[in-house]
Image: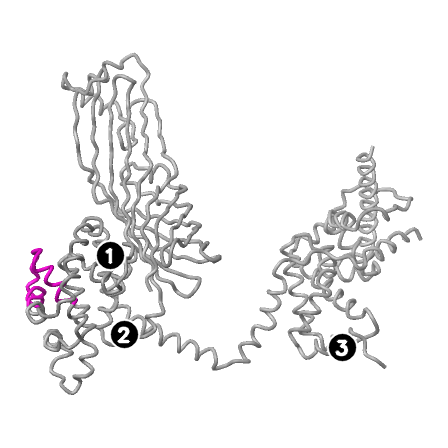
Amino acid sequence: MEESKEQILVKHLLKKEEAAWKELFGAYSGNLAYVCSRYVAEKEDVHDVLQNSFIKMFRSIESFEYRGSGSLKAWMTRITVNESLKHIKQKGDFKSAVEVDDLPDIPNEEEPDFEEIPRDNIMMMIRSLPEGYRTVFNLYVFEKKSHKEIAGLLGIAENSSASQFHRAKGLLVQKIKEFKMSKKAQYE
Amino acid sequence: MNNEWLNNLRSRMDDHEEDVPEGLWDGIKDELFAGEENNSIPGFIPEIHEGGADKKEKGASGGQKSLFYRLGGIAAAIALLFLLTKILPQNDTGRTLSQKPADVKTEDEKNSLKSIENEQGSSKEVKPKTEAFLADNILNIDSSEKITAQRYAESRAENQAENHQKIQDIFKLPTASESFQQESRIAQKVPSVDDTVKESAKEQTSDEVLFKEEKLKEIYAENTKRNTPKSRDKKSWMLSMLTGNVASNSAEQQFPGYASITGKAMNVEQVFTTSEHHDDPLTAILLANQSQPVEARIRHKVPVTFGLSLYYNLGKKWGIGTGLNYTKLASELHSGTENNYIKGDQTVHYIGIPVQVNYNVIQKGRFTGYITGGALLEKPVSGSVTTTYVVNDEIKESSKERLDHKPLQFSVNTAVGFQLKVIDKVGIYAEPGIGYHFKEENAPNTIYKEKPFHFNMKFGIRVLLD
């Protein structure tokens, strides 16, 4: 069976060759920067978290198991998410942000249509969510974690995770609507 | 489940990318690969360091020795600059005189003897001087003047009585004696210039003569040291003359009421004590202005700077330089009304020593662009204030006093420079820049104090000495 490019790269990564790691960085850093900035708001923090993530990858590349195309990316993303969560917890203001309960429930029955919204704008909307909401939302939607897992990861109650997620979703729907309205207003 | 849109959202955003923070890879590389690099070349780096240290030590010891000569060179260059303008006509006569007898070789003995007398006695009359030139010329042409050479040799301790080295001496001494003559001629402040002109047998511009002069002195320095490192030849020196205004415009201070040149408002007590005598001019001014609004204006004139500096190139890009600057700061005070006022004129002369570091950014043909930064320490060498009391447009009294508080003035500056090579080794340059003068409370009230931060423009000539 022929080795894929990914596997060849991993071989060189295991030898800790600088050129291989540079290639890895060049290929994935943009996507990982996106993953990281979903969780971490400050640009400088994103830099630090990404740096720590890459260092962690370097030190634990031996533990990586190839399970088909895309598994390297998934592995890297997992490490980056973990590092991001670590950073959020270290910052300390995470818990309080999560426990904020003063936002009213936003009823949302309709499914928002975001196909026309540029990805940069979607990103901005996600990033503008309050940190606690955002973390839960990210984990649930993008990392496909269950509320039980999220509760375990963040050290919060399971139903708390669910309600956080529910509100985050509501806020996002609202933001998408607002964005569309403003777009409409621009054209009129 | 109504969360289908969230799945869409995920897949849509799946391969999204954000800007990678700047310098991230460098940080990772430093963290992960810096250590390995160190391991890969152990023993190599220390070697370099050792070599570097050695060189530095040599350079330092050599530098200390040659510092004296360098300073001498700078001083001589300044002196020559002034002399060149003064003795240029004299040069021409000297040249014609010295050129004629150069063809006639019969008077060899007599002239050379006289020249020795002349140089040792360092007579300052015109006639022996001319004869000295004759001797020089003959010396230069006729290398068989062993007697003369020997005498010079005797005057130098190192060369004394080394018969087995005679051949070597014969080769070396002409240069030694030449530089000796060079030296004595400088001491006499005689236009040795025309000798250099003659030697090269062409007409040269005064700048180039200056350059040559400097070079010969370098040779002299090398001769005295005897074992100057060869690498010195490769280093290049630059001599530059500059002028410029330190600040691009003058500054004006204005306040209501009376004020002195120091910028401080006169208080009532001061006014009353000085107005005890009835015929006091100040009282007259105060009386005349009784019912009029008065104000004080202090205008700092544009500073004028002249300087001479010497640059030393460290490699292709970097250079350091020092020199001597002269700056004149003048300020005017007008305190009172249009017709009745106190007029003050303050002049402060500064002598400063700059230390500059240059970095050549771009070099294209004749054009060089560079950035420069440095510090300047200035000492006010003299300062005076002339106070004039004017009542009804008439000068009542005028007095002059010297400034006593003259602390050192420290400033830093940076500039962007443009240099254009006019002819070989001579370039003109312009340096627009900014500077900051650190405030000194006791210092006289000058533009440095009023506008510590300023823009300036310098321009000048640079001569490359190599």
Residue A141: x and y in percent read: 83, 56
Residue A13: x and y in percent read: 70, 76
The quadrant of the rendering that contains the C terminus of chain B is bottom left
Measure the alpha-carbon separation of dots 1 and 2.
Answer: 22 Å
Q: Secondary structure at mark 1?
A: helix
Magenta residues (range):
B114-137
Nearer the observer: mark 2 or 3; the answer is 2
Contact, CB < 8 Å: mark 3 with mark 1?
Answer: no
Q: Secondary structure at mark 2?
A: loop
Tell me where residue B440 sits by quadrant.
Answer: top left
Q: Which residue is mark 2?
A: B228
Chain where mark 1 sits: B
Q: Amino acid at mark 1?
A: Ala
Which secondary structure is most common in the magenta stretch?
helix
**Left or right of B16 on screen, residue B89:** left
Q: Which residue is mark 1?
A: B77
Disc 3 crowd rating (10 Å Cα; few below 14, some 14-19, many 20+) is: few
Q: In the rendered view, would you say B315 is above or below B309?
A: below
Q: Which residue is mark 3?
A: A8
**Left or right of A15 on screen, residue B34:** left
